[in-house]
Image: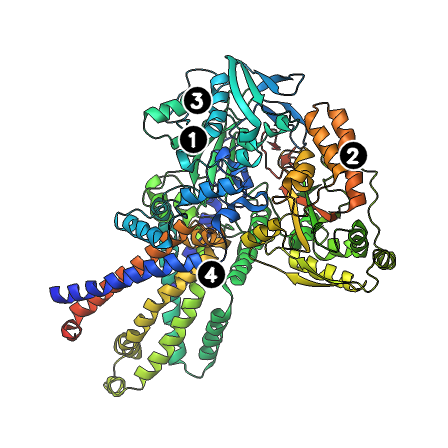
Amino acid sequence: MKANLVKVALGAGLLAATALAAPTAASAKTLVYCSEGSPEGFNPSLYTAGTTFDASSRQVFNRLVQFKRGTTTIVPGLATSWDVSADGLEYTFNLRKGVKFHTTEDFTPTRDFNADDVIFTFMRQFDKEHPYHGVSGGSYEYFNGMSMPDLIKDIVKVDDYTVKFVLNRPEAPFIANMAMDFASVLSAEYADAMMEAGTPENVDLNPVGTGPFQLVAYQKDAVIRYKAFPEYWEGKAAIDNLIFAITPDSTVRYQKLKAGECHVMPYPNPADLEEMDADADVNLLSQEGLNVGYLGYNTEKEPFTDPKVRKALNMAINKDAIIEGVYQGAGSAAKNPIPPTIWSYNNDTVDDPYDPEAAKAMLAEAGYPDGFTTDIWAMPVQRPYNPNARRMAELIQADWAAIGVNAEIVSYEWGEYLDRTKKGEQGTFMLGWTGDNGDPDNFLAVLLGCDGVGGSNRARFCNDEFEQLIQQAKTTSDVLERTRLYEEAQLVFKREAPWATIAHSIVFEPVRNEVVDYKIDPFGGHIFYGVDLAE
Amino acid sequence: MLGFLFRRLGDIIPTFFGVTLLVFFLIRLIPGDPILMLAGERGVDAERYAELQAQYGFDQPIIVQYFDYLVGVFQGDLGKSFVTKRPVLDEFLTLFPATVELAIMGILFAVILGVPFGVLAAIHRGKWIDHLTMSLSLTGYSMPIFWWALLLIMFFSTTLGWTPVSGRISVMFFFEPVTGFMLIDSLLSGEKGAFSSAVSHLILPTVALGTIPMAVIARMTRSSMLEVLGEEYIRVARAKGLAPIRVIMVHALRNALIPVITVIGLQVGVLLAGAILTETIFSWPGIGKWIIEAMNRRDYPTIQGGILMIAFLVMAVNLIVDLLYGVVNPRIRHKR
């Protein structure tokens, strides 16, 4: 009898526990996002991880210009318009009036957003003498990575609502850079207040922005809470509260989604995709990612100096088998070095056909009838553009063996791998790229331009015709003209074949049915302004 | 007694130095330059690389770096994380209570189930109960934690809907941590349902983490119990006509538990190791997951600080245990 009573009591306790696990929030709409990790901090200019941007720039801040949600198209943000001088050296931004900053425990803004905030945001990163430059470690990797210190000559406050950026050289992608996360505008007034209080690093920990959501609380590795900012300049968000439930394991994220513990989850496990697709409660969204995975040839090393050899090896690779075996279907074959979601993608490019016979003949034509011996460098890490480089290398190794080319697979620890490929020790190597700003220049010039040799151009490709096209495209701000130049550059690329373009990964995002109007961000971000929950 | 204390303290100082040395140099032997890792495909140019090296102190000779680190440690400064730029000690102190809470629950689960199982198996030696409990404990012992944890989630959370999938409390509850122990904080918060939410979130991680120690304790209890049950004094007790339950619970179990307690102590290490996997799967914000992440990013200060703190705590616990032995058993106190 006693034992039975204990059992009943335990059972009742368990039931009560589950029933009460989620209190009924009156009428407030709360969206829970099962994020994959903790942000490094809350100032996007200091960090480079997407997880950090999701938690900071994409909810809390705005930029002068922004990407239209779900696209790579640039639209006005905190600047209502901008003018570019005829020589392409001066960008003048006209700022939006009446934009409010968040009010937090430590800080109540006394004025609206103005030019001082823009000056503070960029001068902190640009000017090494700026009082805030060294705060919170003071490394601005994206600002540096996008060559902003060399590009910017001066930033001038023309009046309270006009700011002028003076450049050292014309650079059309500059405007796209201004839409990137590192260019998120911080409050100068808040920074001054914190400096006076002797706690400048609070600016980076307890963010004050102009964005649609304001940070309420953050518990490392557990949860981030936001509430909708009622005075947001584009109008209050449809949801009232936004919660990031930090859940590092992808299988567990899906279990939480199924159990209704969250509404949206990123980075599903490929093995779960089939089940998600069949799940009646879940809507599996997908889109091609803003990335490319490729196999590059060291074009300075014999025999890869000859485009014919490169072309022949391209034709020997069975891309469909790779998409199936390595990407498990979550990839689409790439024919251009830029992904199809970027403007100026040239759909007229003809991909190298998979044809081992023709490949063998071309190899003979190039003077290697018996093939040769080389290496394939495989990255030791998993990346969005290449989920399993080792496996891919094995497939390519087998494909090449069929035309008489014997390749040895080489791998190093990641840092070492990047360093050695930069120096050009490899014959052929695998790598990829994820776009930063949606500009074709961010792929073509960075990865294939002559300036990048010894840096991110690991194929050491430097072709006069290609270089001229991309340099010309950099200096004109006419988008139609730029499109034409980049389309032509892609044809030159295909003819010269410095890489075998393998695949663009497909991004999957399962969301629960009650989530309305969620869009996959081509930059890999997760943006909740504009998203609603059905009753 | 004071002499004993000083002798034990004297042992601790070289151990502590040894740990700092090992940790500091071993992680620098792991291939992978933190700066290059941080930069990824984008890379850094030589000038920026030098700047970052200077910032992290990597431009100094390694001995100087170690000495600087040691000076910091003695001033209670474990450095700042390369990734979050936050003081390592602050991060450790925020996350540690979650690990402790889970470990305590895990060990309670293991003892509360493991000991009775072992006793039952011993009394019914060779019968079906014995076979059942022992094969269950062997299964529990052989089960990989992450697989077992996922299985529990899929069955109890997703299929039956009895327990939440992961986390420490429903995200709908929001209160500032006071002690860092969710069971206590949820009670202190006064919010209706918070405590039961915290309890329900603890069930699966506790089971996943406690299963292996439970199996070990059950097997240990069984064999120790069998040994004691064969002793003369048990036969005497039975012959005197004592109630069988009294013989087992009072006369046998008390003596059988001595080796079991030693094993329970040893299982604390197993629990900490298991916590790394359990924490990752149950999104439990503890130090296990924190150190693993730091390893992957070569976040030296965090790895160093985390391991040093754990080593320090283990040493402190050991010291206390030794002192307690000394209190209980004068022979240990006086031995040199």
Amino acid residing under circle 2 = Glu
CA separation, marks 3 and 1?
A: 13 Å
| Disc 2 + disc 4, Cβ < 8 Å | no
| Mark toward the viewer: 3 or 1 | 1
CA separation, marks 2 and 1?
A: 40 Å
**Residue A55 on image: x %, y %:** 51, 36
Q: Which residue is mark 3?
A: A188
Q: Which residue is mark 2?
A: A487
Label 2 resides on the chain identified as: A
Residue drawn at (57%, 28%) of the image:
A151
Amino acid residing under circle 1 = His
**Colour option used:** rainbow
Note whether residue A247 is visible: no
Q: Classify mark 3: helix, strand or loop.
A: helix
Note whether residue A148 is visible: yes
Task: Kindly identify which numbered label has been placed on residue B208.
Answer: 4
CA separation, marks 3 and 2?
A: 42 Å
CA separation, marks 3 and 4?
A: 49 Å
* Mark found first going from the N terminus, 2 or 1: 1
* Mark found first going from the N terminus, 3 or 1: 1
Residue drawn at (39%, 32%) of the image:
A202
Amino acid residing under circle 3 = Ala
Label 4 resides on the chain identified as: B
The part of the image, by quadrant, that contains residue B25 is bottom left
The part of the image, by quadrant, that contains residue A283 is top right
Q: Which residue is mark 1?
A: A133
